[in-house]
Amino acid sequence: MYPTDDEIEAWATRERLRREQWANDPSPEQAALSTLRERERVAAELERARARPETGVEPTALVRSAVRNVRLATEGAFSLLFKTSPREAFDSLVQEGLDWEERIRDPRVERNTRA
């Protein structure tokens, strides 16, 4: 039912030689087969992407959304800078550092507890 150790070793030797030959100089048949397999792989990947429900969104809309989110995050950072005094910002950074140290020392501390 299962291959013997000798059969497995023989197959591994043949496969190793085949791969070495391919790496050194593929035959035209091997190159054509590889190209065909790569095309089939890419086509299958595209087909899977088309079949996903979330791909109903236009790629340009996803990019626009990502750019908008980055812009909003940047504006939010500047807003926080202007609304927060240097002392408050420093105290907040020190507290974040202390929280970080505690989380690193004790991995059981729950992560993302702040909203």
Image (tube, helix red, strand yellow):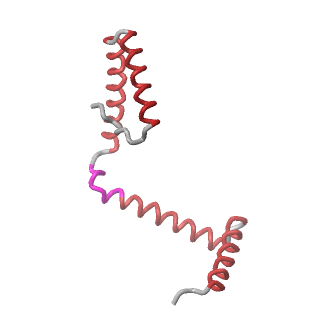
Kindly identify the residue that appears in the image at 56 percent across and 65 percent down: 35
Q: Is residue 53 magenta?
A: yes
Q: Could you say where residue 113 lies in the image, as x and y percent from the top left? A: 30, 34
Residue furthest to the right: 24
Kindly identify the residue that appears in the image at 46 percent across and 36 percent down: 105
* Predominant SS of the magenta segment: helix
Q: Could you say where residue 80 lies in the image, as x and y percent from the top left? A: 33, 17
Residue furthest to the bottom: 1
Task: Name above or below for residue 30 compared with residue 65.
Answer: below
Q: Could you say where residue 108 lies in the image, as x and y percent from the top left? A: 38, 42
Task: Name above or below for residue 45 compared with residue 18.
Answer: above
> Between residues 3 and 52, which one lies in front from this camera angle?
3
> Between residues 58 and 90, which one lies in front from this camera angle?
90
Q: Split into 4 quadrants, where in the image is the C terminus?
A: top left
Residue 10: quarter of image: bottom right
> Between residues 26 and 21, which one lies in front from this camera angle?
21
Kindly identify the residue that appears in the image at 62 percent across and 71 percent down: 30
Image check: 10 left or right of 45?
A: right
Task: Name above or below for residue 73 compared with residue 32.
Answer: above
Residue 79: quarter of image: top left
The magenta segment:
49-56
Q: Is residue 22 magenta?
A: no
Kindly identify the residue that appears in the image at 42 percent across and 35 percent down: 103
Q: Could you say where residue 53 lies in the image, as x and y percent from the top left? A: 27, 55
Image check: 51 left or right of 101?
A: left
